[in-house]
Amino acid sequence: MTTHPTPPAPVPVTPPAPAPATLAATRERLWAALDARDEHAAAATVFAARDAGIPVEDLLLDVIGPVQAKVGREWAAGRLTVAQEHAVTAIQDRVIAALAHRIPGPRPAGGPTGGRVTVACVDGEWHALPARLLAEVLRGRGFTVDYLGAQVPTPHLIAHLHQNGSDTVALSSSLPVRLPTAHAAITAVQAVGLPVLVGGAAFGPDGRYARLLGADGWAPDARAAADLLAVGLRRPGDAPSTPEQGLPHLLDQEYTLVTRTRVQLTRDVLAGLEAKVPAMAAYSAQQRDRTAEDIAHIVDFLAASLYTDDAELFVGFLSWTAGILRARGVPVGALLAALDLLADAQRDFPRARAHLAAGHRALTRIPTPPTPGPHA
Ligand code: B12
């Protein structure tokens, strides 16, 4: 009998150590790739992290989302041009698309399904990326998602719901100036019997404007939104049928009149500023256009603060604007002068004057240049 030597115990094969794929490291690598406008490196970073075990949902919300917010901070601080911001956002969008194609489709019939959700940005809202993140997170959680993208006119949204059906509508808005439009969209969707979930920076960090506008639900981020939808939203019951019923302060017509006279107000304030600020005589046509845009933006935020009857909305916007101006070496004196001119024009509007005064006080109180936050 021959004996064979005992075969050696198999040597455990140690897989090559993957590059550490912590969320923080992935964010840093993604940012470096985006900063270099290197789309391939950006996609490779995200896919390497996914292969190393980071779930797609975490990549969407804890890597791509925060890096996109950093894009905003870098732009606000004057370290990224508008064109660079556009290029970076476009790359992020394509990385999300590539990642989304790895998410399995809706669960098979008979299996668990979260139902059909229509995700759309309100009319005029260009910030589609937050809504896209939400759409992909919901898809990953087993919902069937109809993603309609940026600025969806309310009549088209309603027509789409009639034609395609939906269990819930998720409306996204990043700019508070879109709140009146969001209100109209919420009311219109509820009128066809569907519940509306809202989200995005426009609704405030605590969702206060979502409650004010009668939405059926609000969530601060896509994870919380998916959790909420998994439990189910109540269908609209006794929501006020006209804005005035839910927002009695609108009866004073201040919002309506400021909105209606927006163009004239902007022209008057620009002319007033040119008379008050001698340096503006040397402005190029482009600088003049930018100043007119800034004034129109101030008027729009004033209108939004009148709509919500919340001076804090206006104050927050002015503080953010002051931060942007300071980062570009522009004194805030012209901003204060513009507020004074607006207050003169709003002589008969006590709420508008109160909001303008609150903004004035806040600007004169800011002692040092603030660092603009992601949603300041
Ligand atoms: C990219 C970008 C743009 C792009 C948008 C392109 C695109 N495809 O999205 C473009 C260039 C078009 C753009 C335009 C403008 N922008 Co912009 N933009 C940004 C930026 C840098 C990133 C936005 C983003 O994607 N954020 C990342 C995601 C993760 O944000 P998020 O809100 O946290 O999203 C989560 C939640 O909100 C929630 N959520 C979102 N939607 C929904 C919906 C539902 C139903 C639920 C439940 C939850 C939910 O889930 C998301 C994921 O967890 C931000 C800066 C920032 N910090 O966000 C500025 C920012 C929003 N923009 C700003 C401004 C001012 C503008 C312009 C007015 C500039 C101008 N003068 O033209 C225009 C307005 C255009 C318009 N009419 O809408 C300001 C707004 C300031 C303010 N006080 O409101 C910001 C904050 C820039 C800054 N740092 O100051 N912008």
Image: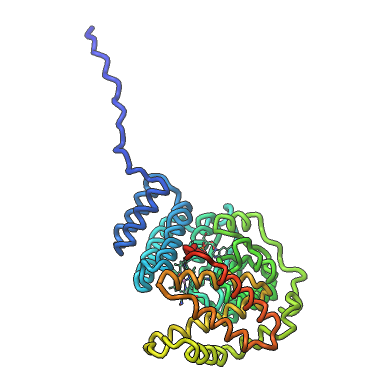
Task: Answer with the quarter of the image where residue 31 lies.
Answer: bottom left
Q: Picture coordinates of residue 15 (x, y %)? A: 31, 36
Q: Is residue 59 above or below residue 329?
A: above
The one of 297 and 244 positioned closer to us in this rendering: 297
Q: Is residue 288 left or right of residue 160?
A: left
The one of 257 and 52 positioned closer to us in this rendering: 257
**Residue shown at 54%/67% (left/top)?**
366
Q: Is residue 70 above or below residue 52?
A: below
Q: Picture coordinates of residue 247 (x, y %)? A: 73, 76
Q: Is residue 326 above or below residue 293?
A: above
The coloring applied to the image is rainbow
Q: Picture coordinates of residue 158 (x, y %)? A: 61, 77
Residue farthest to the top? 1
Task: Answer with the quarter of the image where residue 238 lies.
Answer: bottom right
Can the viewer see residue 162?
Answer: no
Q: Is residue 17 left or right of residue 119?
A: left
Q: Picture coordinates of residue 59 (x, y %)? A: 44, 53
Which quarter of the figure is the N terminus placed in?
A: top left
Q: Is residue 74 left or right of residue 298?
A: left
Give the number of callouts: 0
The one of 183 and 271 positioned closer to us in this rendering: 271
**Residue shown at 49%/60% (left/top)?**
136
Residue farthest to the left? 2
Task: Answer with the quarter of the image where residue 170 lies.
Answer: bottom right
Can the viewer see residue 112?
Answer: yes
